[in-house]
Image (cartoon, helix red, strand yellow):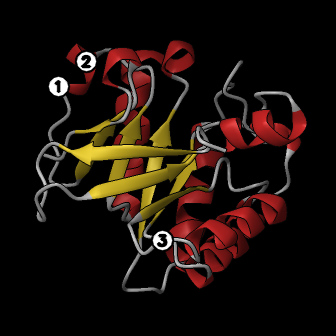
Amino acid sequence: MTKIIKKFHAAKDVEPHAEIYYVDPTDFTQQFLGSPNEGLISGSEYIKFFGYLRQQTNQPMIADGQSGFGNPLNTYFTVKEFEYYGADIITINDQIFPSSTIQPKAADKYDFAGRIKAAIDAHQAASSEIWAKFDCFEEYGETGLMERFQMAEQLGIAGAIFNRIPTDTINKITSSIKIATMNGDQAGQYHFE
């Protein structure tokens, strides 16, 4: 179970040397099902495992809410459960349901907005934040990324994770929210701006 939790070291951080643990659903399914496809697990399976890990550490943890495990109503209850189990950051990605790391497919931007809105509406814990995760850049390009990012920011996300997105595109984003990357050689590096 060594790959299921990935450590992230913040580049610019309120608390120097703080570590954030990302509970990777792809590694979880690889470990337990022999396939790196997070679409094979249900929200309740992932949340139960996340809750077990939460009991093992008081370090900050990122819960991957994937594509909300379905529609906006599912997203709402997923966020509630992650808050109950002590997630510090809850991500909602821009993929259709079920999510896939191997072949991500972009959700319609309004579907994505509906899930982000549901996550924001469900969010009540002062100790957690809702972040958007952008996985489908290859499908919608720079213009589509900017539209989705601005929409999510206006809905109230506290941060964003950019996965497999060119650094020059990320550098064009001007925002006061926290920005993180999961790009190739930068994987695991959080760059807060």
Give the camera-side residue of 8 and 154.
8
Give the camera-side residue of 162 and 35.
35
Q: CA distance from mark 1 to mark 3?
A: 34 Å
* Residue 156 appears anywhere in the view: yes
Residue denoted by label 1: 171
- Residue 34 picture quarter: top right
Residue denoted by label 2: 167
Residue type at tag 2: Thr
User: At numbered mark 2, what does the secondary structure look like: helix, strand or loop?
Assistant: helix
Above or below, comparing residue 99 to residue 46 in the picture: above
Residue for point 17% across, 25% down: 172
Above or below, comparing residue 168 to residue 116 in the picture: above
Q: CA distance from mark 2 to mark 1?
A: 6 Å
Between discs 2 and 3, the one toward the N terminus? 3
Residue denoted by label 3: 57
Contact (CB < 8 A) between labels 2 and 1?
A: yes
Contact (CB < 8 A) between labels 2 and 3?
A: no
Q: Position of residue 129 (x, y in %)?
A: 40, 69
User: At numbered mark 1, what does the secondary structure look like: helix, strand or loop?
Assistant: loop
